[in-house]
Image: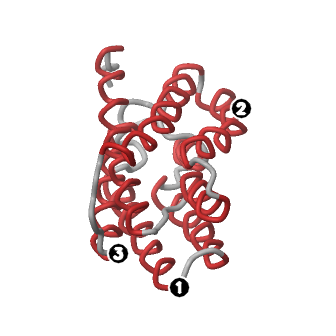
């Protein structure tokens, strides 16, 4: 495969992060969450009121070791840049994107699709949004497990923890979001088609 230029990678990170942060804004407006480290960040945000962006950045820190060890410097640096940018962009989106109302079904379906497209852009430029994404890509590259299926299993467990802080209908729509997001990844990011490192 021909490698992307640094300019292409930089533009892809901005594009992917913008899409994901828009999807996150949809979920936040509807009081939903997603899986992965973003899901854990949502659970902590809803229960403590702490900044989603700060939580997302801090919770990703332990995963860079695996990224560095298994995926290399290039992947890890691009992922760090994407995580830092998403931490900033999610806070900005909540200020810039003014939505008067967001129905839970719409937020779950459309938010999940928008986020999935952002992840695909990042994955195809050898980057991720850290955390479980690093683990999922590592397992895809080294074990042949589909990243979307790995992510879906972990996401389901994380969304289930939200039952402590969210009403059942919000958790169920959050599960729908996680399923939509991960089905898109499973269909479009297959072993051998695009490689992460």
Q: How many marks?
A: 3
User: Where is residue 67, by image quadrant?
Assistant: top right
**Disc 2 versus disc 3: distance between alpha carbons?**
36 Å
Mark on residue 55? none
Q: Is residue 63 left or right of 10 when viewed as pictured? A: right
Q: What x and y, as percent, mark residue 182?
A: 41, 61
**Disc 1 versus disc 3: distance between alpha carbons?**
12 Å
Tell which of 149 and 27 is nearer to you: 27
Q: Secondary structure at mark 1?
A: helix
Q: What x and y, as percent, mark residue 119?
A: 38, 45
Q: Is residue 142 visible?
A: no
In this rendering, which labeled residue sits more in front, label 2 or label 1?
Answer: 1
Residue at 33 percent of width and 39 percent of height: 18
- Characterize the local packing of mark 3: few (<14), some (14-19) or many (20 or more) Cα atoms within 10 angstroms: many
Tell which of 47 and 138 is nearer to you: 47
Q: Is residue 179 visible?
A: yes
Tell which of 132 and 70 is nearer to you: 132
> Which residue is identified by label 3?
104
**Disc 2 versus disc 1: distance between alpha carbons?**
36 Å
Contact check, label 2 and label 3, Cβ < 8 Å: no
Mark on residue 168? 1
Q: Which is more N-terminal, label 1 or label 2?
A: 2
Mark on residue 65? 2
- Characterize the local packing of mark 1: few (<14), some (14-19) or many (20 or more) Cα atoms within 10 angstroms: few
Tell which of 145 and 57 is nearer to you: 57
Q: Secondary structure at mark 3?
A: helix
Q: What x and y, as percent, mark residue 171?
A: 51, 77
Residue at 64 percent of width and 41 percent of height: 60
């Amino acid at each position: 495969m021909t490698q992307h230029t640094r300019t292409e990678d930089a533009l892809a990170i901005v594009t992917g992060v913008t899409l994901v942060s828009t999807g996150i804004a949809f979920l936040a407006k509807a009081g939903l969450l997603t899986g992965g480290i973003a899901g854990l960040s949502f659970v902590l945000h809803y229960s403590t009121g702490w900044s989603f962006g700060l939580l997302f950045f801090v919770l990703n820190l332990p995963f860079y070791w695996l990224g560095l060890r298994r995926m290399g410097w290039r992947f890890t640096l691009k992922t760090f840049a994407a995580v830092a940018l998403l931490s900033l962009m999610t806070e900005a989106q909540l200020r810039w994107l003014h939505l008067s109302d967001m129905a839970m079904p719409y937020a779950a379906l459309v938010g999940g699709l928008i986020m999935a497209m952002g992840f695909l852009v990042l994955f195809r430029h050898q980057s991720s949004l850290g955390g479980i994404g690093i683990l999922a890509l590592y397992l895809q590259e080294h074990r042949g497990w589909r990243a979307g299926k790995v992510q879906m299993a972990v996401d389901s467990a994380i969304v289930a923890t939200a039952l402590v802080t969210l009403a059942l209908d919000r958790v169920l729509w959050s599960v729908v979001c996680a399923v939509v997001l991960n089905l898109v990844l499973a269909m479009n990011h297959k072993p051998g088609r695009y490689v992460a490192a």
